[in-house]
Amino acid sequence: MKPIDQLTPREAQIARMLGQGKSPKAIAAELGIARVTVRQMIYRVMEKTDTKTIVHLAVTMAQADGKK
């Protein structure tokens, strides 16, 4: 199973946006949600995808989107 398959639609959206190089602040502004909500979702995604840092998660998601 690919890491993105384990995520809710919103988690996947945020993870993809990270993979596009967007910051948590920019993601929050674009989606109209609080930065703390974005951060919480990022940490849940990191747990689900077994990534250790936000940068690792962003690279993982960028690679996953590139393989489509």
Image: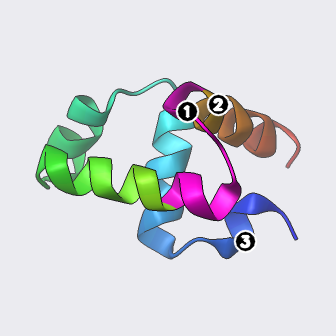
The answer to whether 49 appears left or right of 34 in the picture is right
The disc placed on residue 5 is: 3
Q: Residue at x 64, y 30 (%)?
A: 56
Q: Nearer the viewer, residue 65 or 43?
A: 43
Amino acid type indicated by mark 1: Thr
Amino acid type indicated by mark 2: His
Q: Residue at x 68, y 57 (%)?
A: 49
Mark 2 near mark 1, Cβ–Cβ under 8 Å?
A: yes
Q: Provide the secondary structure element on which disc 1 rests.
A: loop
Q: Residues within 10 Å of mark 2 (few under 14, many from 20)?
A: some
The disc placed on residue 20 is: none
Please name the residue that numbered disc 1 is placed on: 53
- Answer with the quarter of the image where residue 23 lies: top left
Q: Main secondary structure of the magenta part?
A: helix
Distance between the Cα atoms at labels 2 and 1?
5 Å
**Which span is picked out in magenta?**
45-55
Closer to the N terminus: mark 2 or mark 3? 3
Q: Residues within 10 Å of mark 1 (few under 14, many from 20)?
A: few
Q: Provide the secondary structure element on which disc 2 rests.
A: helix
Please name the residue that numbered disc 2 is placed on: 56
Amino acid type indicated by mark 3: Asp
Q: Residues within 10 Å of mark 3 (few under 14, many from 20)?
A: few
Horizontal and vertical percent position of residue 37: 21, 57
